[in-house]
Image: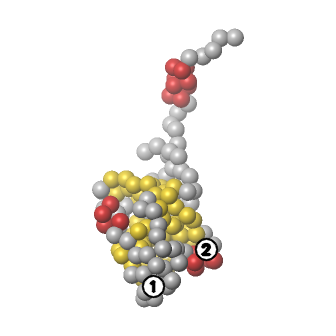
Amino acid sequence: MKKLGPGVFCVFLLMSGPVSAVCLPQTLDIRGPSGQQRFSVEIADDAAERQKGLMFRESMPMSAGMLFVFESPKHSAFWMKNTLIPLDMIFVDSTGTVTQVHSNAIPLDETSIDGGDDVAFVLEINGGLAKRMGIAAGAQIRHPMVQQNSAKWPCSVD
């Protein structure tokens, strides 16, 4: 039996059509005019997880965050009760498009932060990071929790 060389595998990949971008639940990509970033994310997709969020955490790695996932788009408001680190809150619609960013939410502040209507996701990252990375309204996220048939940036090669 003859072994196939490495070139045969490359030809097979080229012939097999477009290769999907890797979309894993634990990573989230975001792109905008300033470029593309990747975050390691925890998912908060039920009421108990969303209520606890990032409370009581004393730190979070710079490339990490938490993705809040709602069953359906809704009016969304957050607060910083029992949250010890400043956060940027990135509000996202069902297509994966950022609708607004609230920068540097104040730790332990119970003032309501209004994310607006039709919020399907909220990405929380370290405070000040969104501005440094140029993340603003109009940016897009890529993640498997975004319905792929309506995603502005689906989990496939652009």
User: Image quarter for residue 30?
Assistant: bottom left
Q: Residues within 10 Å of mark 1 (few under 14, many from 20)?
A: some
Q: Is residue 12 above or below residue 82?
A: above
Q: Tell me the amino acid under the disc marked 1.
A: Leu
Q: Which mark is residue 49?
A: 2
Q: Which mark is residue 108?
A: 1
Q: Is residue 100 above or below residue 42?
A: below
Describe residue 79's horizontal placement relative to residue 12 as left or right: left
Question: In the rendering, at what x and y percent does residue 147 appear?
Answer: 55, 59
Q: Name the residue at the bottom extreme.
A: 111
Describe residue 98's horizontal placement relative to residue 23 as left or right: left
Question: In the rendering, at what x and y percent does residue 60 appear?
Answer: 47, 67
Q: Name the residue at the top extreme.
A: 1
Q: Residues within 10 Å of mark 2 (few under 14, many from 20)?
A: few
Residue in the picture at 38% in, 71% down: 127
Q: Please indicate, yes or no, whether residue 2 appears anywhere in the rendered image.
A: yes
